[in-house]
Amino acid sequence: MIKTMRCLRDFLTLLLGALVTIEVEAQIDISQYADVKTTVIVDKAGRLSKELNKVRFDLENLTALVVEGNINGTDVKFINDLIALEYLDLSKACIIPGGKSYAEVNQTIDKDHSKKIKYKIEEQDVVSDYMFYRLKNLLVLMLPSNTKEVKKYAFSPRKYFDVYFTNKLLPKIESIDCFRYCNRIIVPHADYVQYYALSKDQSYHEKILMDYAPDSYDIDLSNELGIDSYLSGAYPYVKHLKIFGDISDENMELIKKCSNLESIDLSHATIQDVMNLKQWGVKLGSQVSKSYDLLQLEMSQNKLFQVIEQLEMEKKKVLAKIKEHEDQEEKRAEQRFQYEFLSAILGLADKELERDYENNRMSTKEYIPNRIFQDLLGEELKKELKNLDVSEKPQNLEDVLSLLNRKLSEILEEYSSNKEELETLTAEYEKMQRKESMKILMMSSIPADFFPSFKKIKSIILPDNTVVISEKALPGNAMIKMNKENIKISNNIYY
């Protein structure tokens, strides 16, 4: 059971993290509350309920509230009871000690015990723990301009909302974890750098914005400063951009954060879409023509190589025939030895036969058939030996081999003498290919996933040095200006 609960907890943590990623992309549009917000001036702390009831009778439907004057724990408790509240502006309010406890929170003492702790406002101008934790529908919270400190658990963990700082001075932040459940952190533009420096946490940096920024920027990237050095904290406000210099992949990703961009002028910029340019650079390099001398020399070397291959084949055939003849000669020599050995034995047998007959150890009847047999066998051996003496060696094999070797040597010498010149001309050709390929890397390529990310874009001026436009890279809802005559590769353009 415990293991199951842990898995469920881990799953919810991941899901919560995914929701943060999604929600943090958009800032709440506060203009939608301009006509529905109710403003209340509190002359004396603790009287917010009384003053609000004077102007509103349907508090259960109140979605936007502006409070001016002093407020204490009683007022904060009342605010937390406004269940429909989405927009709360306290920028002109002042938090002072006193009043009732505004929150009662169950806190664990140990694994078996917990108790309810009541929270009261004890310090002036401090946004205390759990101060707004029951506002389940809150989307926008504007803090008092004289806030001097924000406690770790000040904000609601139940809803992702935008928190606005309107401070005259940078407040103390007890822990950066107080912003964990915030969607956006909007701070005075003059103090943006100080707020930004409160933490090195990337998730915090992704949330923080200026409360105001120009809608038009001219950005010069030739000084090695990145997009973020110009637009940090101001991305949602940017509507018009003019960029000079080289735009890297990293800078393109940052420009995509300008979610309200309406026009962009890149006429004096270069989009360094290196991966796409390399692909087309190879194609450009392959279009470089070989010189006439190189073509002729390649043809000559190819022909010589073919002749060398043919001569090598003929040489192998001749060597095979010579080897075959040598094998046959070796076999004949072995047979000759055997026949000569048999002849020698037959000669000894003849002498023994004659001695036996002369010494009457063999009768005439026995002698005559043996004599006839040995004479016949002797004749057959003589014939076989005579046949072995006839050489069947092919005519002129050695001469043919010598001729082939001489011709092959001449061709190889010519082939080798051309090789150095061929290598020189080939190296020059490959250098031209690389040079042509590298040219395109100084130009601009429009990636497919860049402009479509701007949903409000109306006007696009492409870089003057654009040579490649990826398929479907240009949105159909914008006016596009480009120098078409500069586009060298057009078979993948779609617009």
Image (cartoon, rainbow, N blue to C red):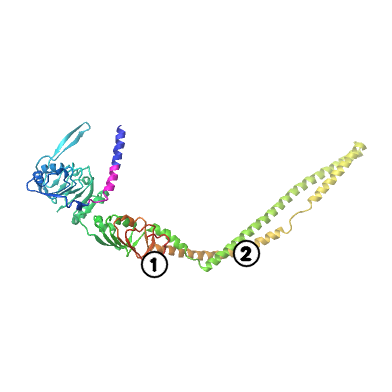
Farthest-out residue, bottom:
292
- Residue named by callout 1: 485
Provide the major secondary structure of the magenta segment. helix
What is the x, y in percent for residue 28?
22, 50
Q: Identify the image quadrant of residue 484.
A: bottom left
- Residue named by callout 2: 410
What is the x, y in percent for residue 107?
19, 36
Q: Residue at x 12, y 39 (%)?
A: 101
Q: CA distance from mark 2 to mark 1?
A: 55 Å
In which quadrant of the rendered image does the C terminus lie? bottom left
Q: Residue at x 59, y 61 (%)?
A: 305
The local crowd at label 1, few if under 14, some if 14 to 19, many if 20 or more residues have their Cα within 10 Å, is few
Circle 1 sits in a helix, a strand or a loop, which is it? helix
Question: Is residue 25 a member of the stretch shown in magenta?
Answer: yes
Q: Evaluate if marks 2 and 1 touch, with contact meaning CB atoms under 8 Å apart.
A: no
Farthest-out residue, front:
57
Circle 2 sits in a helix, a strand or a loop, which is it? helix
Q: Earlier in the sequence, mark 2 or mark 1?
A: 2
What is the x, y in percent for residue 158?
22, 42
